[in-house]
Image: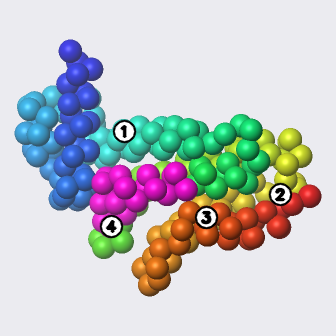
Amino acid sequence: MAVDRKQQIIDAATKSFSLFGYKATTMEQVAKLANVGKGTIYTFFKNKEDLLDEIISSLILEIKEAAEQAMDPDRPFFENVHRALYRISEFRKQHQLTVKLLQEVRDIGTPAVQEVMKKLDRAIIAYIREKIDIAIKKGEIRNCDAEITAFLMLKVYLALIVDWEKEHEPLTKEKIAELFELYFLKGLSK
């Protein structure tokens, strides 16, 4: 029963954060949406920040799962990284919560939201770094600083998808793969 209540609270908070943003969401709203007393929330979570952190942690798992599903062990490293990054960025663009939180960071700069979005980016970078380390060990790519390379790959990818579209026609998945290969594959090729 307690697990159900906790999940009800998480679902209600996710819905509220997605609709109104973190800053505009109150614990009263979450309690009302979850159909529980406000005190019940505090039996599971210290505060609103703790609740958001829990939601982002499960979102990170969902994103990693989506990225894993996009990859094929029989395909080369660069194709898999492209597939994973594409899936990650699509996920970020389509998931109502990340869209709302990114908007809140941009428009208001709420510190708690900035923190969880950094946590999200760090988790994605760590995930990509892990794949880079494996590719280096397998001899698929040249030895490089996996942390910096993962950071650059994520930032370039998001820039091509998110920032580029602000003033240009969106790039096709194929064009992004081509650019990605040009900028990274050529530099890291053995």
The circle on residue 174 is: 3
Residue 175 in sight: yes
Q: Which mark is residue 144?
A: 2
Report whether 56 appears left or right of 41: right
Looking at the image, is mark 3 or mark 1 earlier in the sequence? Answer: 1
**Answer yes or no: do the residues labelled 1 and 4 have beta carbons within 8 Å?**
no
Q: Nearer the viewer, mark 2 or mark 3?
A: 3
Q: Is residue 12 above or below residue 184?
A: above
Task: Work out how far the residue at label 3 is from the one at label 1, CA to CA, in angstroms.
Answer: 35 Å
Disc nearest the viewer among 2 and 1: 2
The answer to which quarter of the image holds residue 94 is bottom left
Q: Which label number is shown at residue 54?
A: 1
- Secondary element type, mark 1: helix
Dot 1 alpha-carbon crowd within 10 angstroms: few under 14, some 14 to 19, many 20 or more = some
Tell me which amino acid carries mark 4: Gln
Q: Nearer the viewer, residue 185 or 114?
A: 185
Q: CA distance from mark 2 to mark 3?
A: 26 Å
**Range shown magenta:** 86-104
Q: Residue at x 47, y 74 (%)?
A: 170
- Seen at 56% across and 63% down, the residue is 173
- How many residues crowd around disc 3 within 10 Å: few (fewer than 14), some, or many (20 or more)? few
Q: Are marks 2 and 3 in contact (CB under 8 Å)?
A: no
| Residue 103 marker | 4
Q: Position of residue 47 (x, y in %)?
A: 26, 42
